[in-house]
Image: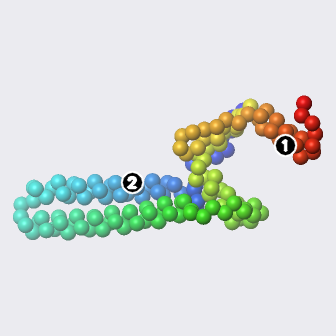
Amino acid sequence: MRKIISVGMKGGGVNLRDIDSKKHEIEQLSSERNNIIASLRYLPDEASRQDAGREIEHVNDKIASANLELQELQNKKVSDEVDLNFDLNSEAGKFKVNAILCSVLDKVVLDDLDCRIFFKNGNNIKISYVLMKGLAESEDRMKNGEPWE
């Protein structure tokens, strides 16, 4: 049996789709600005060119505003402070853990024999349940002072 337990995670309280959407908006505005600039040479008189210039300034203002909004979203997504003391009984503590995990994980896939973790940078790791059980038993033996076989 294979089960994907998490896909399309949110990061740090900011939906990553919001960031992508804002980038797309900036691309659209840049394209609009380039179209206006390209049409300048075909305008018949100075008044039309001045109107186009004002329109370009308006689009530039929109681009600047969208860039600031994008920067704010990206700043929310990545925090400078990393506090590893989590109270997992509180919602805030659970949110912190979720934000950290979601900032690096793309998805986690559980299979019958192993668990695969896919990271946003394209790497992935595979953890065998047998290995995980062996690690847990080894840790228990170390705690109890039992001899190794």
| Quarter assignment of residue 126 | top right
Q: Position of residue 73 (x, y in %)?
A: 48, 62
- Disc 2: CA contacts within 10 A as few (<14), some (14-19) or many (>=20): few
Q: Residue at x 62, y 56 (%)?
A: 100
Location of the C terminus by quadrant is top right
Toward the left, the furthest residue is 45
Identify the mark at residue 149; answer none if there is no mark: none
Q: Residue at x 28, y 54 (%)?
A: 31
The relative height of residue 107 versus residue 66 in the rendered view (above or below) is above
| Quarter assignment of residue 46 | bottom left
SS at circle 1: helix
Query: Disc 1 versus disc 2: distance between alpha carbons?
Result: 49 Å
Q: Position of residue 141 (x, y in %)?
A: 89, 41
Which is nearer the eye, 9 or 71? 71
The relative height of residue 149 versus residue 89 in the rendered view (above or below) is above
Mark 1 vs mark 2: which is more N-terminal?
A: 2
| Quarter assignment of residue 38 | bottom left
- Disc 1: CA contacts within 10 A as few (<14), some (14-19) or many (>=20): few
Which is nearer the eye, 88 or 20? 88
Which is nearer the eye, 110 or 72? 72
Q: Residue at x 71, y 36 (%)?
A: 127
Location of the N terminus by quadrant is top right
Q: Which residue is mark 2?
A: 24
- Which numbered disc, 1 or 2, marks the residue closer to the eye? 1
Q: Position of residue 39 (x, y in %)?
A: 15, 55
Q: Amino acid at mark 2?
A: His
Q: Which residue is mark 1?
A: 139
Q: Amino acid at mark 1?
A: Glu
Asked if one can make out residue 7 in the rendered structure from this viewpoint, the answer is no
